[in-house]
Amino acid sequence: MPKAPKLSETQDAGIPDVEYRIESEPDADKVIDFEKEQHKAKEIIAAATVIFCLDFNTLSRIKHLEPSISSASAIKVLIDHHQQPQEDAFVYGISNTTKSSTCEMIYDFIVAAGHQSLINKDIATCLYTGTMTDTGSFRFSSTTASVHRMVAFFLDLGINHTKIHDNIFDSFLENRLRFIGNALLNRMEVYYEYNTAVMCIPKYDLKKYDIKTGDTEGLVNYLQSITGIKLAAIVIDRDEERKWSFRSKDGFDVNEFARKHFEGGGHKMAAGGRSSDSLEKTYDYFLTVIKQYETELNKN
């Protein structure tokens, strides 16, 4: 089986470090990035009386932020739709895996609290964006009638859904297309004996094509579009760790797969994971692990 790129292929080559960007949304400039403003963020967390924990259900998923949240005296409220929440970490919470997105759950929370009238166009824009991206532009099975009723309410408020979609999916630079082309041509392997496709992205590629956080979003879906593929996986070499994304079809549970083998989790058909091993080592480990699931991945 092909190996992950050798270390000699992933050297810096004198290309500038990647700088991350934040997609523009209403008041995005007011968001405090913990990694960039740790002192300020820690002060706010320590002074808080209530902390809403959104779209993650175990404190380990927030990495360097975990100690601050864990030690905070504030009441911690969970709103999340992933599987197997860390119940003892939160005082109150809503965990509903049938929901399309945490943004839909926030909308439900506001409505149940009797404050739907306070939702304005900017709030609706943010909630719509989160719901749209988490439902694959409303094509996933979690997109229920209630989601469309919520969207109809947002449209009545005047959100520009076409512009939102364009800003998220149709505003990339040329370098991203070249990166995707290189990834499909040179970084993709298909193992039909396991109905599995995997892509291994070295740090060299990220720097060569000046890839930002978010530019790799959706790349794993190309693998899932291959006929017969039940397990699609992509691993990306980040600065501190190797990040995994998993997608599946026909009942293969990538939430359990990610939790068992890659310190991750998520949904049954969409999950993420991580590894502190080198890119080559974690890739080889993945190739070893999928052999254990040969029977399951070959079920009709």
Image (cartoon, helix red, strand yellow):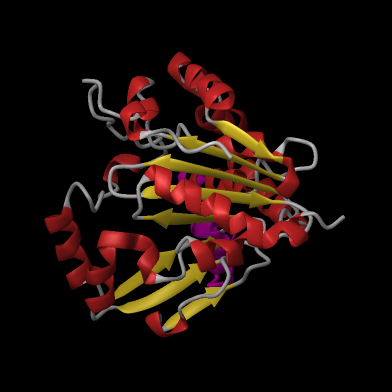
**Exactly how many numbered labels are in the figure?**
0
Instruction: Tell me: 189 left or right of 42.
Output: right
Magenta range: 102-125
Q: Residue furthest right?
A: 300
Q: Residue at x 62, y 59 (%)?
A: 254
Instruction: Find out whether residue 249 is within the magenta segment.
Output: no
Where's residue 278, x and y in %?
35, 47
Taking the image as shown, residue 278 lies to the left or right of residue 272, namely: left
> Farthest residue toward the front?
1
Query: What main secondary structure does the magenta stretch of the protein show?
Result: helix
Q: Residue at x 53, y 48 (%)?
A: 245
Residue at horizontal 56 percent and vertical 55 percent from the top: 288
Given residues 29 and 12, the one toward you in this image is: 12
Q: Closer to the camera, 77 or 229?
A: 229
Task: Check the image and report above or below for 67 versus 289.
Answer: below
Residue at image point 25% right, 60% down = 64
Residue 125 visible? no
Q: Where does residue 183 sit, x and y in percent of width and height?
A: 52, 26
Which image quarter holds the N terminus? top right
Residue 110 part of the magenta-drawn span: yes
Q: Nearer the viewer, residue 29 or 140?
A: 140
The C terminus lies in quadrant: bottom right
User: Residue most toward the left?
Assistant: 39
Q: Position of residue 264 (x, y in %)?
A: 48, 62
- Relative side of 167 to 42, left or right: right
In the image, residue 216 sits, relative to residue 131, either above or below, namely: above
